[in-house]
Amino acid sequence: MRRAAATLALALALLVAMATAAFADSPHFLFANASVSTSTGALDVNFKEAGLGTTVSTEQVTLTVDNATAVYQCFNNGGNHPKAGNKETVSTSLTTTGTFPVRNGQTTGTISAGPPSQGDFACPNGQSLFLQSVTYSGITVTGSAGDFLGATPDPASSGPIHLLIS
């Protein structure tokens, strides 16, 4: 009876060890939370990726944004925008990659992108350029093993902001 119980306990322990090892080599994101910085207009995505195994010391994570739209506008020294033509809306896709430390088979971090550049748009003399709003959509984080997760909320928007660019 003792021998049967010992054999059963050993088999169960072996099964648990094999299941844990299989899970440890199954990379997956637990969350990806998007927000827009009110001080820079950048998209910040906080994430946690697990199942990376114990032999990995770093993990490459890529942030992809299908569409980033920013509105730039010129204002005079009195704080007014004198001409409706002194406004530019730009849209582009964004991709950035970061390397994050792995501890106990998981990594947690923040990866940022944007805002899109105003390009060649410039203000006339006596006016300053401000970022008025920015919206990001199609937000995805991807691990080096190809695991991915769409960030929430999507889209992520700054709402009205008034950030001096130049």
Image (spheres, helix red, strand yellow):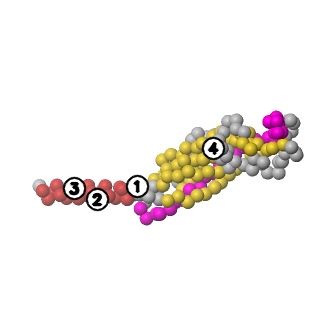
Does the image show residue 149? no
Disc nearer the start of the sequence (1/2): 2
Instruction: Please give left or right for residue 155 compared with residue 81 in the image.
Output: left
Q: Nearer the viewer, mark 4 or mark 2?
A: 4
- Alpha carbon distance from label 4 to label 1: 35 Å
Q: Residue at x 67, y 36 (%)?
A: 159
> Of helix, strand and loop, which mostly describes the magenta segment?
strand
- Which numbered disc covers residue 37? 4
Q: Can residue 144 be found in the magenta stretch? A: no
Disc nearer the start of the sequence (4/2): 2
Task: Give amino acid for label 1.
Answer: Phe
Few, some or many residues within 10 Å of mark 3 (<14, 14–19, 20+): few
Q: Which residue is mark 1?
A: 23
Q: Residue at x 58, y 39 (%)?
A: 153
Query: How far across and down, in percent of the image, does residue 37 sit?
Result: 63, 44
- Alpha carbon distance from label 3 to label 1: 21 Å
Q: SS class of the residue under badge 3?
A: helix
- Alpha carbon distance from label 4 to label 3: 53 Å
